[in-house]
Image (spheres, rainbow, N blue to C red):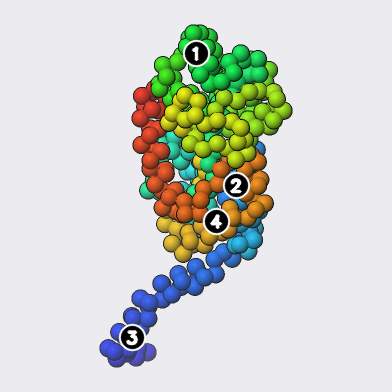
Amino acid sequence: MRLMKLPHTTLLLVAAIAVALPPFSRAVAAQAYPSRPITVIVPYAAGGPTDAVARILAERMRTALGQPIIIENVSGATGSIGVGRAVRAPADGYTVLAGTLTSNVFTGALYALRYDLLADLRPVALLADGPFILVARKTMAASDLKQLMAWLKANPDKASQGTGGFGAAEHLAALLLQQQTGLRFQIVPYRGNSPAVQDLVGAQIDIMFADGAVGLPNLRAGLIKAYAVTAKNRLTAAPDIPTVDEVGLPGFYASLWYGLWAPARTSQEVVAKLNAAAADALADATVRARLVDLGFEIFPREQQKPAALAALQKAEIEKWWPIIKEFGIKGE
């Protein structure tokens, strides 16, 4: 059987069509996205602040995207296991990471990761900020931050500060406080902020940096006392608590911020759709009210862009990695 020989011009036309097909196919795929459920990996156990942010947003984002959003909790190694799973996931927009300062900044200095936090993930959206509240047991005599610091100075190594775990953001904030003020106190790691604040209520420890989710309910109940918010502005949910700038600890800013990332090779079109859905959710009055009630502050719309998340992550690496290395902290 003899094969028909095609004219040269026909071969050129076929080749041109073949070259043009992949971008066309990608465009069609992007237009169809999403066509099935999306999984959001939370690199911590259910019930924590990252999990809360992800679940609150997921409820509203499914409306914009028209598909269910499944939360998958992948905890362990300060969040690095869950981040690694997101890095290895197909870059098709159906696996997204809900991460935070700890998982997407601290882990790079705490562990010898098999991935690059900046190069192997693509920023999608900057979501919410969770400044810490410096709180103390109710029986603490100091009535304000200056008195508290004076008491800590007069009682070196006698006070105890609880943290959410070794290498957690509260741990790093405690070390930063010691570094900047020269104060000395014991740092007691717990398995999360909830058990730490329980011991604070029971006066088993003296002070801690609490996130809003565990700090505010206990403050509202009168079980602990607050001295300052570690941010430039007062919390919307607790406007009576002064900032560190107002009460003698200027510039001492520390917070757990939250963002969405996708695998590095995820297309710009898919990232844009995810970002728009996240921004739409953050603009929803119900979503905003729920986040604010938990002590979160929502970033302005212009800061919810992927570029803003990328810039913040890089700046926080430059701030915190030297502190982690200086104190010789390693992941457990």
Which is nearer the eye, 32 or 22? 32
Please tell me how crowded label 3 is: few (under 14), some (14-19), or many (20+) other residues with Cα within 10 Å.
few
Which element carries disc 1, helix, strand or loop?
Answer: helix
Q: Amino acid at mark 4?
A: Ala
Q: Could you tell me how far apart the alpha carbons at marks 3 and 4 are, in whole angstroms?
A: 44 Å
- Disc 4 and disc 1 in contact, CB within 8 angstroms: no
User: Where residue 111 appears, x then y in whole percent?
Assistant: 42, 33
Please tell me how crowded label 2 is: few (under 14), some (14-19), or many (20+) other residues with Cα within 10 Å.
many
Which element carries disc 2, helix, strand or loop?
Answer: helix
Closest to the camera, between mark 2 and mark 1, is 1
Q: Could you tell me how far apart the alpha carbons at marks 3 and 1 are, in whole angstroms?
A: 82 Å
Residue 54: give its label.
2
Which element carries disc 3, helix, strand or loop?
Answer: helix
Q: Would residue 332 be seen by someone viewing this image from the given angle? A: no
In the image, what residue occupies the spot 55% across and 46% down? 298
Q: Could you tell me how far apart the alpha carbons at marks 4 and 1 are, in whole angstroms?
A: 44 Å
2 or 4: tag closer to the N-terminus: 2
Which residue lies under the disc numbered 1?
Answer: 150
Closest to the camera, between mark 3 and mark 4, is 4
User: Where residue 299 appears, x then y in whole percent?
Assistant: 51, 48
In the image, what residue occupies the spot 59% across and 18% down? 143
Report the residue that reaches farthest toward the left: 8
- Disc 3 and disc 4 in contact, CB within 8 angstroms: no
2 or 1: tag closer to the N-terminus: 2
Closest to the camera, between mark 2 and mark 4, is 4
Q: Amino acid at mark 2?
A: Ala
Q: Amino acid at mark 3?
A: Leu
Q: Could you tell me how far apart the alpha carbons at marks 2 and 3 are, in whole angstroms?
A: 49 Å
- Disc 2 and disc 3 in contact, CB within 8 angstroms: no
Which residue lies under the disc numbered 3?
Answer: 13
Which residue lies under the disc numbered 4?
Answer: 279
Report the residue that reaches farthest toward the right: 221
